[in-house]
Image: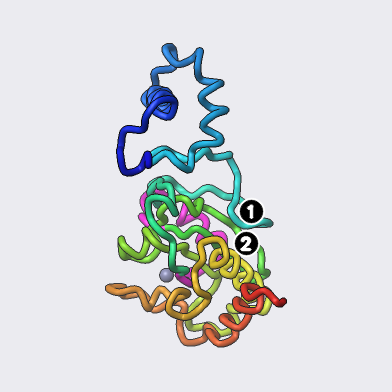
Amino acid sequence: MEATSGRPAGGDADRRLGRRALLVGGAAAAVGTAVLARQELSHLWWRLPGVDKPRVAGAVDFRGARWVAASPANYRQADRPDDYPVDRVVIHVTQGGYRSAVKAFQDPAHAAAAHYIVRRDGRITQLIRELDVAFHAGNRGYNERSVGIEHEGFVEDASSFTDAMYAASARLTAAICGRYGIPADREHVIGHVEVPGTDHTDPGPHWDWGRYMGLVRQVHTPET
Ligand SMILES: [Zn+2]
């Protein structure tokens, strides 16, 4: 109801205005109600349109991932999946080593970054929260609706793609599919090369889609 009326009634309106005041920096005026408002908002945030979800520094969306922040210039803060539905996973290859990929994503001039990087040894780093729109697909609509996963290596080098990498990346993709209700198929788990308008070729011919999707479905499909 709040979402359609734009003007929620009663207590909700007060809380919302209180939050707005906080957001615009009315700290002195709001200080008395701040604690109460925060407590109430912690239960209500998902019902309030256009309000940032609370964020915890260093928090990750995938258990076991290591957090390394990308430059804010390489993504747009958002409130997915409330403002944009998430219905795609886009698979990339870094065309370089892990360190150079991290460095590029931390560089505000790079103008691109993905949510995750999966290393050859299967370690996963998250650089951008899934809440946010990462600039990874070179297509605004696809960026807004997808999670981007980079893989350390080179498209032309089959040895880039290790067992550990496939296994770790498949667990990550399966978890993303599970969280947003994305079908674990090739319509929804795509390569960068398949994004309309791109001139990128990753993940390239050595990426074993049959094997990868098999692993994703193994984790994604509950065995009952
Ligand atoms: Zn790519």
Q: Nearer the viewer, residue 110 or 125?
A: 125
Q: Secondary structure at mark 1?
A: strand
**How many other residues sit within 10 Å of disc 1, few (<14), some (14-19) or many (≥20)?**
some
Q: Position of residue 29 (x, y in %)?
A: 42, 12
Q: What amino acid type is highlighted by mark number 2?
A: Ile
From the viewer's perspective, is residue 1 above or below residue 37?
Answer: below
Q: Is the CB of mark 1 within 8 Å of ligand 1?
A: no
Q: Determine which quarter of the picture holds residue 61.
A: bottom right
Instruction: Specify the label residue 66 is tagged with.
Output: 1
- What residue lies at 55% left-to-right and 64% top-to-bottom? 176
79 falls in the magenta region: no
Q: Nearer the viewer, residue 182 or 205?
A: 182
| Chain-order first, disc 1 or disc 2 | 1
In this view, the residue farthest toward the left is 197
Q: Position of residue 97 (x, y in %)?
A: 55, 67
What span is colored magenta in the figure?
Answer: 90-112
Q: Nearer the viewer, residue 104 or 164?
A: 164
- What residue lies at 54% left-to-right and 73% top-to-bottom? 153
- Look at the numbered discs 1 and 2 and tell me whether their residues touch, using CB distance below 8 Å: yes
**How many other residues sit within 10 Å of disc 2, few (<14), some (14-19) or many (≥20)?**
many
95 falls in the magenta region: yes
- 17 sits to left or right of 224: left
In this view, the residue farthest toward the right is 224
What residue is shown with label 2? Answer: 124
From the viewer's perspective, is residue 11 above or below residue 81?
Answer: above
Q: Nearer the viewer, residue 116 or 157?
A: 116
- What residue lies at 51% left-to-right and 32% top-to-bottom? 41
- 11 sits to left or right of 165: left
